[in-house]
Image: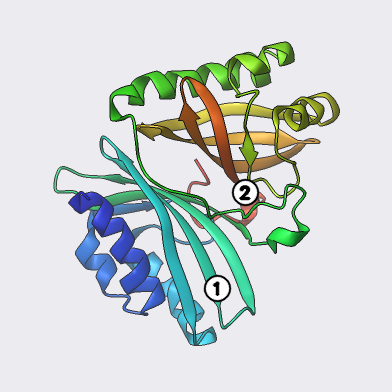
Amino acid sequence: MSEKLENAKKLYLEGIKDGNMDVVDTYSGDRYTQHSTGVKDGAQGFKDFFKGFLERTNDRDIRVVRAIEDGSYVFVHVYQDIDNGEAKWITTDMFDTDENDKLIEHWDVIAPYQDPSKNMGGTDQVLGDFEIKDLDKTEENKALIRSFFVDVFQNKNHDAVEKYISTEKYINRNPHVPNGIDAVKQFLANQDFNYDFIFHVMGQGDHVVSYSKATLDGNELAVFDIFRIENGKIVEHWDNMEPIPPRSEWENTGKF
């Protein structure tokens, strides 16, 4: 694992989990531009925000479940259990890094973790096997996902969904959509959902991550999608969605 990815994980585990706020100075670069809308820019903004969080919580079970890197960008998919079930969260975080592998910019989406037994597909929102394969297909798989968004969602070519998603197996870890390609077709037919723009696509082997602005029934969302690809088709999907708050509530330049 690279130093840049270790820095991202350590910021989470040493800073937030263990409560050592000074590590942000160790792992961040000359700047730390923040896009989590409730947090001010800079290392001090990070410290000020999490000071209250650490004072309010006693037990923080935080686990980095999957992590990928692509160029200067790193991504972590994290499960959080706060105070033995008082709150459970799924967090998705993307960082840009400098030439010294220090963290210089951060984007995130956080959403509640739901009991898998209550999810429509019975799947867990964050778990699943994580092993990066097919490193030689990274760029091919990133291109597939870009084309998927443009073709199926932005151009509304719903009949093309089988070009991108496996008809044999498709595990959907969105709690509101069942497994299988037929459920995707039904979702596309019945929901007013669109990706307004794709901010960034990164990938490593068979895993591709996208960060996008989307609308659902007219409401703006920040969305991370994670895809696992086999033989040129999407076979597994995780996502994390968060409503974009009003601009008056932003402490920085916003989600993007």
In this view, which residue lies farthest toward the front?
A: 168
Which residue carries the number 1 mark?
A: 81
Specify few, some or many for label 2: CA neighbours under 10 Å numbering under 14, 14-19, or 20 or more. Answer: few
Q: Residue at x 56, y 83 (%)?
A: 83
User: In this rendering, does residue 36 appear at all?
Assistant: no
Q: Secondary structure at mark 2?
A: helix
Q: Quadrant of residue 134?
A: top left
19 relative to 231, above or below: below
Q: Residue at x 40, y 75 (%)?
A: 17
The residue lying toward the viewer, choosing from 79 and 245, is 79
Alpha carbons under labels 1 and 2: distance apart:
29 Å
Q: Secondary structure at mark 1?
A: strand
Please report whichever mark, 1 or 2, sits nearer to the chain's N-terminal start: 1
202 relative to 27, above or below: above
Q: Amino acid at mark 1?
A: Asp
Which residue carries the number 2 mark?
A: 247
Q: Amino acid at mark 2?
A: Arg
Q: Residue at x 42, y 23 (%)?
A: 141
Q: Is residue 210 left or right of residue 114?
A: left
The residue lying toward the viewer, choosing from 77 and 30, is 77
Specify few, some or many for label 1: CA neighbours under 10 Å numbering under 14, 14-19, or 20 or more. Answer: some
Q: Which is closer to the viewer, label 1 or label 2?
A: 1
